Image (cartoon, grey):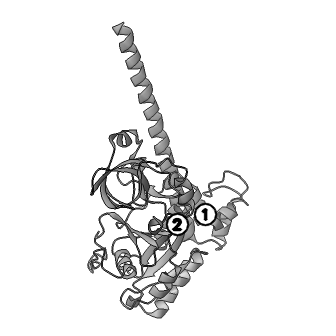
Amino acid sequence: MEELGFSGKITQIINTQELEGFELGRVVVEHKERYSVQTNQGVFSAEITGNLRYSASSRADFPAVGDWVKLTLMDSESAVILEVLPRTTKLERRAVGRSGEVQIIAVNIDFAFIVQSVGHDFNLKRIERYLSICNSAGIEPIILLTKIDLIEANEINSLLSAIRERIREVPVLELSSKTTEGYHTLKKILKKSATYCFLGSSGVGKSTIINHLKGQEVQKTSEVSISTSKGKHTTSHRELFVLPNKSIVIDTPGMREIGMIDDRTGIELTYQGIESLSKLCKFNNCSHLDEVGCAVLEALEAGKLSSDVYDNYQKLQREQAHFARTVAEKRKKGKAQGKLYKAIQAARRKNKY
């Protein structure tokens, strides 16, 4: 179990659970509603119980890659998941195409690698989005700048300066899977029993990095399209791997959309400079849009705050506020429907007797 990350906070949580007569395992692969779970007895193909399915208030309550679960073994190959054990961390985003719902990316994560390539994918605003969801979850981010063999050293330095100007106190590593530059440093920072998650768009090299770290091709890779500068979704599911140094990594499918959820904490931590300025505003509830005495707008006008940073901050704030409203409306609608159902049932009982 130590090889699967059974240490630290998760040990304390699991030790409080009633596991006598059951197996403990960690979800290593997720394919819709079928899972591969690693236990001391080996890897089992698992499904969830009907009780767990119907008691879940949303998809976020279903098992996810990285989850520790309580299960019963049915035979030498299959098992049934009875319970998802409490999570230490939860990396999530707004569910694509489902209003007011959250999608789990991975759970029980210690560190998140935000992967950006120096070519088609490099985008500071996207990095700030990833930072916001990491900060919301209390997960330590590390930025990986990939495919550095494609550009000159002065261009790399320019990108690094741009990152460090806007994003401070977050480590940045430069990698080339072609020359293996930077891999020695990457391997040195990987901690035994710690769990790392790879985040990034398709084609930035997440799977290639895992193949290098694993020392064998465990994930399929594909080239980025020259005509569209977009990567193909080679990784179609989430999967957990144990590396030779006993650290754990989780690969995820490429994500073009990183929608904000109803948690302001991540945005506040990502934009600490703006949050510090907001304390100097004349009004406590200043929106930093057009108020008199707004310290943020004054810094923007004086050139002390980047307009690009300010614009992205406001955009993420609007997304977060919209999602919060959607969730509130959904809950209100659910309560109204619940009251109507109870009223109908009461009327039926009254008419019956």
Does dot 2 land on a helix, a strand or a loop?
loop
Disc 2 marks a residue whose amino acid type is Asp
Check disc 1 and give the amino acid type.
Leu
| Residue at image point 49% right, 63% down | 6
The first of marks 2 and 1 along the sequence is 2
* Residue occupying image coordinates x 49% and y 60%: 108
Question: Observer-nearest residue: 322 or 307?
Answer: 322
Marks 2/1: CA–CA distance: 17 Å
Q: Is residue 148 above or below residue 111?
A: below
Judge left or right: residue 294 versus residue 137. right
Asked whether residue 271 appears in the rendered view, the answer is yes
Observer-nearest of 5 and 266: 5
Mark 1: secondary structure = helix
In the rendered image, the quadrant that contains the N terminus is bottom left
Q: Position of residue 330 (x, y in %)?
A: 44, 39
Please tell me how crowded label 2 is: few (under 14), some (14-19), or many (20+) other residues with Cα within 10 Å. Answer: many
Determine which of the numbered discs, if any, sits on residue 269 in the image. Answer: 1
Q: Which quarter of the figure is the C terminus placed in?
A: top left
Residues packed near mark 1 inside 10 Å, few (<14), some (14 to 19) or many (20 plus): some
Q: Which residue is mark 2?
A: 110
Tell me if 86 is positioned left or right of 210 in this view.
right
Q: Nearer the viewer, mark 2 or mark 1?
A: 2
Please state the horizontal and vertical placement of residue 218, each as a whole percent of the image: 31, 75
User: What residue is drawn where x is 41% and y is 29%?
Assistant: 337
Numbered badge on residue 159: none
Q: Image quadrant of residue 291?
A: bottom right
Badges 2 and 1: C-beta atoms under 8 Å apart? Answer: no
Q: Position of residue 263 (x, y in %)?
A: 54, 53
Judged from this view, the residue extending furthest toward the front is 21
Residue 43, picture quadrant = bottom left
Instruction: Examine the rendered structure and indicate whether residue 335 appears above or below residue 264.
Output: above
